[in-house]
Amino acid sequence: MASPWGGWGTKLNVTSIVSQGLEQVRSLREDVEKSFDQVVTGAPGARVPLPQVEAEKATEETLTEDNVNPNEVLEVKTESGAPAAAASAAVAEDSEATEDLALDEDKQQDEASAETEQDEASEPVQELAEEEKQAEGGDTDALEDQREAQEQEQEEVEETEAQEETEAEADVEVEASEQAERVEVLGERDVEEEQEGAAAGDDVSEDIATLRMQLEMRESQLLATSTTIRELHDELDKTCHREVAAVERAQFLTEQLENMRGEVAKLTQLHRDTSTSQSADVQALQKALAEKEERLSALLDEGQALSVKQAQLEQRLRSLRKEKDELEERALKSQSQFEASAAQVKDLTSKLTASEEENARLTLENRQLTSSADTTSASVEKAEQGAREAAQQLEKLQAQMKELTLDVSSKSEELERLKTATQSNEALNLEKAELQQTLQFLQDTVRDLEQEAARREEMARAEIADLKRKWLEAVGRVDMLGQSVSEATQPLLRQIHALQEEQRARQESWKATEGTLLARIDEATEERRAVEQEKLDMEQQLHERQREMEDCEVELTRKQAELARAQDAAENAKADARELRGQADALQVDLDQAKHQRDAEAEAKQQLQARLDSAEKSPKKIEASATATAELGQAREREAQLRQDLEWHRQELQRLKSSTSQPAQPPLSAGSTSSQHHYVRRNIDGEQYNGVEGVNGGLSSEASILKTTLETAMGDSLSSTGGNTSVLGLSQLQQRLRLREGENRMLKQQLEALEARQKQTTDEIVRLSTRNALLESGEAQRGQAQLELAKLQKHQVVLLELFGEKEEQVEELQAEVSELKDFYRQQLDTLASHNEQQQKQREQQHQ
């Protein structure tokens, strides 16, 4: 059985690193929101604190190395930005409400370190913020629109977070119920073992007591291991719940980061200066992370050792059960042998009682014959025949006594065998000793009977005359005695037969119940094995899920690198947009110059008109008027051309204004889409990633070619225009606009590629959800199997109670057998006392 402890360590390490990085992103988003609120409200210091922003970038680069607690960083950032607006404060309160489960000590340490850094860097940040506030006074309308979009996205993310938190809580409850069911199964197994130990016979009572002590010790150990495993599972569930909540909340924050990352691009230089002060904190956090990982590894090692001990205990319990079954089989065999010997003893007792009654009646007959010997002289011959028949009967009785002695010897041998089979049964040894005594007593009685028979023969020969007279009466009396003996022994034989039949019926019922119990136990063991196999399958699926999570995390790092590259491209596009704004300002200046030139031309036109008027008045100046009309026509043509140029400049200025607002939007939208789904995009193949990189490379090469062609066209236009500065500025502006359009097309293609990846990730999520549904159905089947197992265990308990009742019945039968033995002893004692009395009477008669 594979131990699932190995996958927990990797899961905790990687997922905790991801959650911490996302918490860093959340804190940066909150700082950006605060700066945005300050810009909108016109408060002083309307820029983001420089050290915090640059520290956030540094922590994003070292996410895979640093294992800082995300809850701590979040609280530090929220405390440092106390004078924020009401909207950002509400967002911070929502984020803090979901993360109250973090450790308080680590929070206080990180808060102190962050506050010191912020106090050091607050003064230069405020100065730079005031300078940048003056430069960005015209962007407040656009920022307000972005703020409204951010609030809408935040509401959607909070709804998704609430749904996923409920799902995580349901998973935690399912795991807790599974742990409780495992502990109950272990307790029920221990109860079954104790009940089976209690069902053992009296022959193995001492061994069962020792086994019970061992089982109690094992039960306490198993309970201790189950509690430790339950605690570990609870800790893992808490950490997983925190990680899921942090990752879900990070989606909206990453969108905020992508939208506002362009605003803080100028602060990277200051972060390089302050990175040295933060390295010490990073090292301390790394040490704390290493200590936590060592603790987790120690806990995992302890869990593995406990699992090994549990396997050893299970093997020991199986061996003990086998030994217990063997002892029970031996006890049943010895019990059956004992019952057979008891039946034989009963037969012997019945025979002995019959023989004793016959002996008593024969003694009475002898007394009657001695008293009537004087009157039976006429029937001497008949009496001799009767005496011979009596001698034959005595011989028969002696033969029967020998057979009885042989039977008793065989029973003694069987008792010796029983003694070797059940050494711990002292009752059988006592019974054997008593039987040996009874055997010796029977042998003595046989000898006495032989002696008495010899005396009878002598007395019969001496008193043959008397016996002949009383022979007829003796024959009648003997017939009467035979009938009375047969009638007296029949009820006892019937009782013995009924007892034997009842014992056989009990044995058959016991065998039937034992067979049914064994069959049900086998079925229960098979079901338990099936459940264990299902458990192993579930653990294998869990390991596969953990591997998939690791692959997704690797893919996440790749996507983050790609996102950083897209952010750089967006920053470059924004810088180009700023350059375009400067060029638009230059074009505005050129337009003003063109207006001044148009005014100068209008003045020249008026002067020419005045000259024409003067020329018309003076006919002497016809030639001058002709030249003036020519110059006036040229001036009109030039004025029309200037008007056309002015209209074209106005159109280009409008296009520039529209283009300056548009280029910054595609990379931001691309960043937002990528940040929206960066948590979902985890299972994208490496080939697709390489293909998208190839597309990006092709687009960048096309943009570079377009740029070079535009630069050559710019050079040609410069050489062709000569000294005309206005036409040169327009050509440069057109070329730059074409370049920006090419870059916009490239960014749109990247956005389409990211949307294709998003579709693939949604398909993967659907597939994983179907798998989760199948796993939940398997868990339901497992619960049903456990319920059936509980029912079987209850039925087994009922059967064990029936078995206890049967054992009580057997004990009652044993008590009855002991009573019969006592009765037999009493009969033997009475027989011995009667024989002694007869001997004394005969001695008195002889005297």
Image (tube, helix red, strand yellow):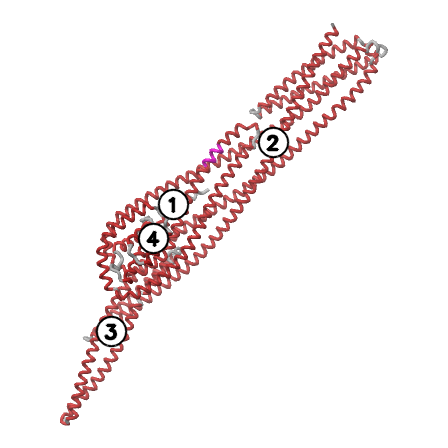
- x, y percent for residue 728: 22, 73
* Front label number (4 vs 3): 4
Sequence order check: which comes first, mark 1 or mark 3?
Answer: 1
303 and 157: which one is in front? 157
Out of 618 and 695, give the one closest to the viewer.
618
Say which residue label 3 marks. 730
Q: What is the distance, in whole Å, between disc 1 and disc 3 at their CAs?
A: 64 Å
Please state if 374 lies on the left or on the right of 24 as rendered.
right
- Mark found first going from the N terminus, 4 or 3: 4
Type of residue at label 1? Gly
> Compared with residue 262, is residue 436 higher up or lower down, i.e. above or below?
above
The percent position of residue 811, horizontal first and vertical second, equals: 61, 29
Are the residues at dot 4 and dot 2 in contact (C-beta closer than 8 Å)? no
Q: Are marks 1 and 4 in contact (CB under 8 Å)?
A: no
Of the residues tagged 2 and 1, which is closer to the observer?
2
Image quadrant in which the C terminus is located: top right
Q: Which residue is mark 1?
A: 9
Element at badge 4? Answer: helix
Amino acid type of the residue that numbered disc 2 sits on in the rendered structure: Glu
Residue 129 figure quarter: bottom left
> What is the spatial separation of the Cα atoms under label 2 and label 1, in whole angstroms?
54 Å
What residue is shown with label 2?
807
Q: What residue sits right under mark 4 in the picture?
A: 23
Distance Cα–Cα, label 4 vs label 3: 48 Å
10 Å neighbourhood of mark 3: few (<14), some, or many (≥20)?
Answer: many
Q: SS of the residue at dot 1?
A: helix
Circles 2, 1 touching at the beta carbon (< 8 Å): no
